[in-house]
Image (cartoon, rainbow, N blue to C red):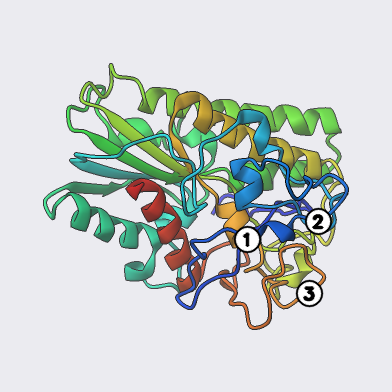
Amino acid sequence: MRGMVIVVAMVSACAGSSGPDGAPDAAPRPPDAAIGHDAPEPDAPRSAIETCFPPPANASTPHPNYDQFHPIVNSECTGTNYQAIAGVERVVFLGDSITTGTPPTLPTAFYRSLVANEMRAKFGLLIDVQDCSGWGARNDDFLGPPHDQIHHCFSDVETRKTLIVMTMGGNDMSSIAKEAAAGDTPAQTMAKVDLALQALEEAVTWLKDPAHFPNGSYVVFSNIYEFTDATGDLASCPAAAVAGFDAVAAPQMTPAYLHAAEQYLRIAVDHQIDMVFSLENFCGHGFHADDPTSVCYRGPNTESWFDLTCIHPNPKGHAALARLFDTTIAE
């Protein structure tokens, strides 16, 4: 694996507590969860984002400003809702090790295996399913050497209607965070984030180009989750030191993560594709799941969705991630 995801004290608003199957609840948190000086008045109109993910009680803590893009969100608050996905003939998975899958989770429990099964049930057993993801992949691996996942998986013209499912960006942010800790200035850090975002947008542009997909293509991708439940406590994962995490991230990583989160959503809105809210739905299922002081605290006995590598989902996490994708694709 090329690099581990480094997390900082970036607070996103969090969805409701998980259900008994480890999946996010379909219903958003109640309106009274929005507390703080910048929360709307009780009778004020609420945006889709505010309804799904109310601001945390500590309103002085930053969280992504998604409302600036006026996104359309699906009824289960699992993702955006821009594509009416139908008639799929081919499913392709791109991205990093979250998509590839990692032990000790069994291959049959990887989220991509679960999503592939759901897509076969939805579109027919004979649809073509291919995985072109790779461990350690970064956004520039979509179209750049040596991996060039897109050209490895697609000819220049794909006549089958294709659904592309992907997770990517965690390894970019890991590398950027390490370089920030080693002395990069805030401006250098943000410039590197923008390069990673540019690589993602170039990939999306290619995947949505009708010259490459004359019969249509759909893209569903995830934003970048983190394992500290918005506390920034990297050492909360027992294997953090072994995984190469520093105890404290460079301060410029908070605005860097916020910028990345917002721009992932902008790319979905601008290109009319769909993004699943992994960051928001996984918050509260990390290594501070039992910490009532965390802004993402979901209550006692909340399950962790991360394995001992700190950054990869355990079977419950893979099941939850599969549900985020399945419900976003279905609506």
State the CA–CA distance, disc 3 to disc 2: 16 Å
Please give the name of the residue rendered at 33% of the width and 62% of the height, measured from the top-left corner: 114
Q: Determine which residue is flagged by label 3.
A: 292
Q: Quadrant of the N terminus?
A: bottom right
Callout 1 secondary element: loop
Query: What is the quadrant of residue 291 in the picture?
Result: bottom right
Whichever of labels 1 and 3 marks the residue nearer the N terminus, that label is: 1
CB-based contact (under 8 Å), mark 1 and mark 3:
no
Check disc 3 and give the amino acid type: Pro
Neighbor class of circle 3 (other Cα within 10 Å; few <14, some 14-19, many 20+) is: few
Measured as percent of width and height from the top left, residue 130 is found at: 26, 47
CB-based contact (under 8 Å), mark 1 and mark 2:
no
Measured as percent of width and height from the top left, residue 99 is found at: 43, 54
Measured as percent of width and height from the top left, residue 65 is found at: 71, 38
Q: Determine which residue is flagged by label 1.
A: 29
Residue 113 in the image: above or below residue 138 = below
Whichever of labels 3 and 2 marks the residue nearer the N terminus, that label is: 2
State the CA–CA distance, disc 1 to disc 2: 12 Å
Query: What is the quadrant of residue 154 in the picture?
Result: top left
- Mark 1 or 3: the one toward you: 1
Q: Determine which residue is flagged by label 2.
A: 35
Neighbor class of circle 1 (other Cα within 10 Å; few <14, some 14-19, many 20+) is: some
Q: How many marks?
A: 3
